[in-house]
Amino acid sequence: MAKKTILFVGTRKGLFLLTSDGKRESWTLSDAQFLGNLIYHVQPDPRDKDKVVIGAKAGHLGPTVYHSNDRGATWTESTSPPAFPQAAEGETNAKAVNTVFWISPGHASEPNKWYAGTSPPGLFVSNDNGTTWEPVKGFNENPRYPELAQFDGTPGGQMVHSVIINPADKNHMYLGVSAGGVFESKDQGKTWDPLNKGCAADFMPEPDPEIGHDPHCVVMHPQKPERLYQQNHCGIYRMDRPDNKWIRIGDNMPKEIGDIGFPIVVHPNDPNTAWVFPMDGTEVWPRTSPDGKPAVYVTKDGGESWKRQDKGLPSKHAYFTVKRQAMTGDNANPMGLYFGTSQGEVWASIDEGNSWKCLASYLPEIYCLRIMEYED
């Protein structure tokens, strides 16, 4: 059997597939699927080598979810996508889903379960492999929900992202809320507690609020679930549970680069190795590569030190950035890294970031990259 790799590329104007063999040296770009639709998130199912679920938004039909049982060859729309309850007569503050922003598979012991994060902030669950969705009331109707959903300043609105299920405990969950913070549940979403101690909130009037932080992306190491990393609006952080305080490992980044960005990726076999893609976080927040010189930065010691990785990337006048879902890695040895840019380019490294090659150009703005690996 031969190893195959599919890189799903979700963009502002449709979905594309880049396919390769196990060597990952030559890639073939597909025609567009869902042309004209926004593809916010693509999630292959680690429990099923053929299953993929996407969060999408059609310009005239609104937010929805599609699922595929044949690795993206064909798609079926959910019959009941994520939606908040209908407003009661006379109600003026009812919510409506604007985007299905994030998709996560459930625990390995629950093969038909999926979670979705939305904007406005909402958490939804499917127990039938993405066909129908229902609200997770423990989050959506949480007594503290008004506190975490009162900030309107984030581009595209607040959203739930980084929905994480602990592989060692199906009841243990984390999620990120833009301009809300990181939250933890130990009872499969029935109750939630904020987990933001140690994070800076430079935009808030108080220095260390319990709620109101702005995580951009939160990841858990798959083999060491107690190790968490976070790329935040205000820095890069690490947490080792059961500790409840984040450590700002971004303070060890070069000062001229800073520690502001959107994505963060961990090495599947080494909890001390992680990659980020910094952006210019100066006063005007241009959301471009610092000084127009893009680079990935890697730590191999849990954030104690960082190394620049830019071989093969443009050396100047490259003013793109990378969104939170648009950087990912595979499980090969050596590991492959991939990122998609705001200018529609897909870049890949098959030597763990030491050198980079452009796989595709002139695509629409890239929102998401995800890898599917299988044998055929």
Image (cartoon, rainbow, N blue to C red):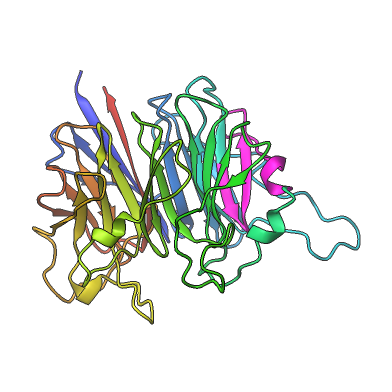
Query: Is the residue 216 above or below the residue 256 in the image?
Result: above
The reply to whether residue 367 is visible in this rendering is yes
Q: Residue at x 65, y 55 (%)?
A: 97
Q: How many marks?
A: 0
Q: Nearer the viewer, residue 318 or 275?
A: 275
Name the foreground residue: 74 vs 250: 250
231 within the magenta span? no
Viewer-proximal residue, 18 or 144? Answer: 144
Residue furthest out toward the right: 89
Q: Is residue 65 left or right of residue 11?
A: right
What segment is highlighted magenta in the picture?
116-141
Residue 345 in view (yes/no): no
x, y percent for residue 200: 44, 63
Whether 177 is drawn above or below 111: the answer is: below
Asked if the magenta segment contains residue 129, the reply would be: yes
The quadrant the C terminus occupies is: top left
Q: Position of residue 299 (x, y in %)?
A: 21, 49
Query: Residue 179, relative to residue 73: is it above or below?
Result: below
